[in-house]
Image (cartoon, rainbow, N blue to C red):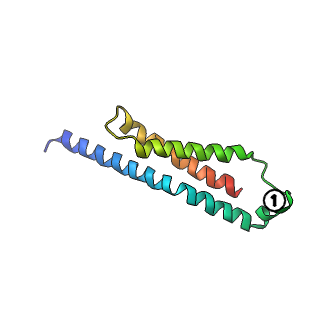
Amino acid sequence: MSRTDTTVNKSLIQDRVRQRSAGIALILLIPTVLACGLLYVASDYGGRCVTYGEGCSRVPDGWAYAAFVVSAVCGSLAAGVPGRRRGMRAARGGFLAMQLFAHVAVAALIVS
């Protein structure tokens, strides 16, 4: 086996791992939103905001929605587009990183 074959196989394995990771994170997006929403409503801070409208976050709600959409779109691209498309193997890592960053941002924005 030549050195080039080993490098190509390693690249394919890395791509598959990234693709699976993106799929798992995409599946966990809705449960994350639900769990964070429940945590927010269960807290004194969140309960007071929902009930009386006082002490709510000053961050616009649109940011959480935008982060959710970015996470869903990047996750769909990273998990769904086949690796044999031109440049997808190189782009999948960036899509996965952006998906995970947006995923964490959604959770933080909901809890805050």
Residue 39 location in percent, x, y? 68, 65
Q: Residue furthest top?
A: 86
Image quadrant where residue 32 sits: bottom right
Image quadrant where residue 70 sits: top right
Residue at 36% x, 39% y is 89
**Residues packed near mark 1 inside 10 Å, few (<14), some (14 to 19) or many (20 plus):** some
Residue 88 location in percent, x, y? 38, 36
Residue at 20% x, 39% y is 4
Residue 3 location in percent, x, y? 18, 41
Q: Tell me the residue that label 1 is attached to.
A: 49
Residue at 62% x, 50% y is 105
- Determine whether, in the image, residue 8 is placed left or right of residue 68: left
Look at label 1 and name its amino acid.
Cys
Q: Residue furthest left?
A: 1
Residue at 59% x, 44% y is 69
Quarter placement of the C terminus = bottom right
Quarter placement of the N terminus = top left
- Determine whether, in the image, residue 91 is placed left or right of residue 52: left
Q: How many marks?
A: 1
Residue 23 location in percent, x, y? 44, 52
Is disc 1 placed on a helix, strand or loop? helix
